[in-house]
Image (tube, rainbow, N blue to C red):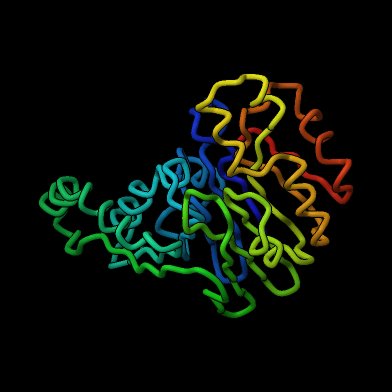
Amino acid sequence: MQVVILGSGSPLPDPQRAGPSTLVRTAVGDFLFDCGRGVLMRAAAVGSGAAAIRALFLTHLHSDHITDLNDIYTMRWTMSFQPNPLPVYGPAGTAPLLRATEAMLEPDIGYRLAHHGDLKWRPSAEVTEVESGVIFDEGTVRITAAPTNHAPVHPTVGYRINDGEHSVVIAGDTVPCAGLDELCEKADVLIHTVVRRDLIEEFGLPRLTDVLDYHSSVPDAAQTAARNGVGTLILTHLVPAPAPGTEQDWLNQATNHFRARWYWLSTC
């Protein structure tokens, strides 16, 4: 199994970081988790693309995590040579989101059908709304969902991908909660969104300090990893984006709570 961080950014546009998105490569194909700004550009850089994705998994329906859903939906359709519905898993509300996305794209769909003689079918998606339990089981790969806590955004889910003896957890946006603990137990890798409470409080802007009550801080994520015996913690969806040279400051906030192996996210 291989984990590729396609984007580690936040809702704020960043010239160095794409929006939240993680590609997990397994024995049965590529799985995409969330689809933030620039996801297909970053996927192309690692030899993947919309037509090749086995399934898309959404942790929640906040705009920064679904910004490029329309791009994936369109490119999967136009870059396939036979009907190739997009499998999408996500929390309640995912099905109407896909219907609304298709409705938004209706003019473009009409233009392409009228212009391309060999494109004789419409784009489509196969949506499965999930809450908890095993949601995908094929070959050596099993994917499990569990509810997380990003209130007032509700419902939200995290995912655990097991491929043989290896496992990775995609936390999404959440505060520490029982569902996330369930997913994380003895996982090899936890990919966790984080904010820097100290920096945000220093800015003091209400629109920014509002995010503190429904995101995990760096210590929160480290404590979740330590509590559940996680092997490696990867910090992503970094708010505010780290200034060059300050990466160690972020890690220092976690090492008092979690002292296993580390990977720091490169610019992505």
Residue ID at (54%, 35%): 10
Q: Is residue 252 above or below residue 76?
A: above
Residue ID at (79%, 61%): 228
Seen from the viewer's position, the closer of residues 163 and 151 is: 151
Q: Is residue 117 left or right of residue 228?
A: left
Q: Quadrant of the N terminus?
A: bottom right
Q: Is residue 122 left or right of residue 114?
A: right
Q: Position of residue 253 (x, y in %)?
A: 81, 35
Q: Position of residue 35 (x, y in %)?
A: 46, 48
Q: Residue furthest left?
A: 114
Counting the numbered discs, the total is: 0
Seen from the viewer's position, the closer of residues 156 and 140 is: 156
Q: Position of residue 81 (x, y in %)?
A: 30, 63
Seen from the viewer's position, the closer of residues 268 and 218 is: 218
Q: Is residue 86 above or below residue 22?
A: below
Residue ID at (70%, 21%): 244
Residue ID at (18%, 51%): 109
Q: Is residue 66 left or right of residue 208?
A: left
Q: Quadrant of residue 128?
A: bottom left
Q: Is residue 44 left or right of residue 3?
A: left
Q: Position of residue 79 (x, y in %)?
A: 33, 54
Q: Quadrant of the C terminus?
A: top right
